Image (cartoon, rainbow, N blue to C red):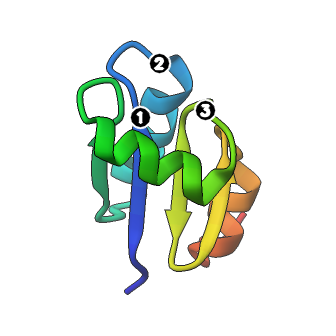
């Protein structure tokens, strides 16, 4: 199983779309609210080199925004 982490904020539409995608495909993930957690926000910026959300990390790969194709590819989900 791959290690999936999402850095998000509570009111972000694309964050919700990404988390809904994970739920739909039974993907276990760890979520960090970067609006409430300054240390996780700093970690996200260090990993992604930007401040926009969502930032999804799958193993060592970083996806910025909601990119269903990239999520499917990295998680080995058939199109």
> Which disc number belongs to residue 8?
1
Q: Are marks 2 and 1 in contact (CB under 8 Å)?
A: yes
Residue 49 is situated, as x and y percent measured from the top left of the image, at: 69, 49
Query: Closer to the observer: label 1 or label 3?
Result: 3
- Residue at position x 64%, y 39% from top? 66
Residue picked out by circle 2: 12
Q: Nearer the viewer, residue 29 or 76?
A: 29
- Secondary structure beneath dot 2 equals loop
The span from disc 2 to disc 1 (Cα, nearest Å) is: 7 Å
Q: Name which of mark 1 and mark 3 comes first in the sequence.
A: 1
- Residue at position x 75%, y 55% from top? 69
> Which disc number belongs to residue 40?
none
The span from disc 1 to disc 3 (Cα, nearest Å) is: 10 Å
Quadrant in which residue 53 is drawn: top right
Residue 77 is situated, as x and y percent measured from the top left of the image, at: 60, 71
Count residues near mark 2 (Cα–Cα under 10 Å), then give few for <14, some for 14-19, many for 20+.
few
- Residue at position x 64%, y 71% from top? 61
Residue 54 is situated, as x and y percent measured from the top left of the image, at: 54, 37
- Secondary structure beneath dot 1 equals strand
Identify the image quadrant of the N terminus: bottom left
Q: Nearer the viewer, residue 15 or 44?
A: 44
Residue picked out by circle 3: 51
Q: Name which of mark 3 and mark 2 comes first in the sequence.
A: 2
Query: Closer to the observer: label 3 or label 2?
Result: 3
Q: Tell which residue pokes out farthest to the bottom in this image.
A: 1
Position of 60 compared to 36: left or right? right
Q: Nearer the viewer, residue 52 or 74?
A: 52
């Amino acid at each position: 199983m791959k290690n999936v982490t999402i850095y998000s904020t509570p009111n972000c539409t694309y964050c919700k779309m990404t988390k809904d995608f994970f739920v739909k495909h039974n993907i276990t993930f760890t979520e960090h609210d970067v609006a409430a957690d300054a240390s996780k926000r700093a970690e996200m910026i260090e990993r992604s080199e930007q401040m926009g959300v969502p930032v999804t990390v799958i193993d060592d790969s970083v996806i910025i925004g909601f990119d269903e194709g990239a999520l499917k590819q990295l998680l080995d989900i058939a199109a």
